[in-house]
Amino acid sequence: MANTAVSFVLQQLYQLAVEEGTLLRGVHRDFQEIKDELESIRAFLKDADSRAADVNGGGDNEGVKAWVKQLRQASFRIEDVIDEYVMYLAQRVNHSGFVASLKKIAQRIKTMKQRHQIASEIQHIKLEVGQIKDRSVKYQFTTESGAESSSGTRMTDKFGDRKKASFFIKDTQVVGFETQRNELVSCLVGGTNELMLVSVVGMGGLGKTTLSKYVFDNKQVKEHFDCRSFITVSPTYNMRELLTNMVKKLCKDNNDSIPEDMQNMDDTSLIKQVRDYLEPKRYLVLFDDVWKENFSDEIEHALISNNNGSRIIVTTRLTNVAEYFGRSFPIHVHQLLPLPENKAWELFCNMAFRGKCPTELEAMSSEIVQICGGLPLAIVTIGGLLSTKPKTTIEWRKVNQNLKMHLKRNNHLTDLIKTLSLSYDDLPYHLKSCMLYFGIYPEDYTIDRKRLTRQWMAEGFVIYEDGRTLEEVSEEYLAELIQRSLVNVSRVGFDGKVKSCQVHDLLREVIIEKMKNLNFCHLIMHKDDEQVTVGQTRRFSIAAISNTVLRNTRNSGIRAIFVFGKDELPEHFMGGLSSKFKLLKVLDFEKSLLNYIPYNLGNLFHLRYLNLSHTKVTVLPRSIGKLVNLETLDLRQTKV
């Protein structure tokens, strides 16, 4: 509703400007141009983000990153000038005498310095964006449709080496999988003769490939099936190559000759070749790391149901992929969870010490295992790194204290980061900002569903769909992040709906690194935190009050402020909210030591979300009635 009203004001004002031939007409025209430019930039960023994230890119990678950073900063400035322009107009419209007010606005704008500042800023941005986009030719950027294919190719490059490592499994790496292994083996060799699919689902790093390969190579399984084929699908598979590879592996496993004319076959012929080969046999096919639900539609015609007790295994991070296969086959979904504490400890000791942990290193080792959060890939990777270090308390204390730094710098640990990053990189563009929001909250923080989704709505992350409310769409966004095994459900209500959620600690580290690179949010963790360059970040997450940052930040483009610390909020910060952070959309003070709201809070024209729950606030200022865009006001557990 607020957007509709603003659009109406802009349109009426534009008509008056045209009639009078004022400079305002040029401002409005240029204003519309940079709005269009912002949409163009966003399309470029969909491709550029994935290009800059490609750590295995060519020598121009740093140039790509610099170019993307310049483009993103330009988009920030465009958003700022748009919001400032809308606020500037809206503040001068009186609720009474609307048409008369519009004429007064047009007359006043002619002589006001701010109009010229807006016009000057728009012209400067247009020039800067033109120069930046000229340089895009060097990096051959495309819009969204082109980004999908190029991004997928790069994802394949990233995950190739990681997959190879899963094919060579040591017994020390399968700790904690005994129960799952037995359950999966039973599903494969027992039960119905009807073709059945077994889906292993879980987040990256949980050991889906390791467990499935362990089961695939199990002696009982080998003896039960006439032929087996292990197929790595990858995010961007080619169906023809996949079918060809499938025929070759099936023939090799059964010591049969490979058809000579296979290279000349089309997809239909290849499907027939697979069906003919499988029809008389009890077969097992493992499709590893499936990312797309329509993979089921493409492969089902090749997988003949011959009532021989044949089985299909699919590993995936996406719950909906497993569910989609259920349209074609009976399915058994095996949800892989983090290792329990005792199994995580056993696996770590196997990797780091080849057995028992020295008594003097137990405390520090326990802390490291806690950081791994039951993620087998993290335990194996970090344990393997520590196995090369001297077994002294001094050396291990160094590693423990700098583990997060090691995650970024150590070659073995960067593979862990790549694995966790793959799921983020595969997200649709509109979900990436939603995912980054989890990095705003402190480590191990359980986030209320409504709190999170309403903040997404306030920020404009949720895209309107006909016939649906924004709240319904935002909850669908969260459901997709859960289905993709990126977000863990912490609590479910009596109605079956998610009440709260959180992310794995190591995944949060990946998110924080991406937040920094994208200037998405600045985490103020210490009282001596350094000053943030104005315009270089869009959000503050305040765990500790840094007077340096809060006092010296002014006229910024900050869109959201979260306060999680237990320190008293300084008066200069609270009193300066409406002047220093005039473009704020989200203010979250939940459970902070807040005892009052400044009288001029109502000047925050763009504010859409205000959370004062569990604070000591007792009264709201009268100016809060001016917050015409406010969508959420949370006053739970206050004395208001």
Image (cartoon, rainbow, N blue to C red):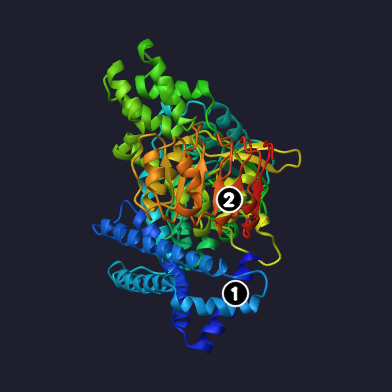
Helix, strand, or loop for circle 1?
Answer: helix
Q: Nearer the viewer, residue 370 or 184?
A: 370
Q: Which residue is mark 1?
A: 9
As drawn, the label of residue 571 is none
Spatial CA span between label 1 and label 2: 26 Å
For marks 1 and 2, give the one nearer the viewer.
Answer: 1
Q: Position of residue 238 (x, y in %)?
A: 45, 61
Furthest residue in direction top, as rendered:
359
Tell me the residue that label 2 is attached to.
Answer: 455
Residue 414, horizontal then vertical, whole percent:
34, 41
The quadrant of the image that shows the C terminus is top right
Question: In the visual, does 106 lie left or right of 449?
Answer: left
| Residue type indicated by callout 2 | Gln
Identify which residue is drawn at 32% across, 37% down.
Answer: 412
Residue at x-position 61% and y-position 67%: 3
Label 1: how many Cα within 10 Å (few below 14, some 14–19, many 20+): some
Residue located at (48% from left, 88% from top): 21
Task: Tell me if residue 22 comes above or below residue 537 in the rendering.
Answer: below
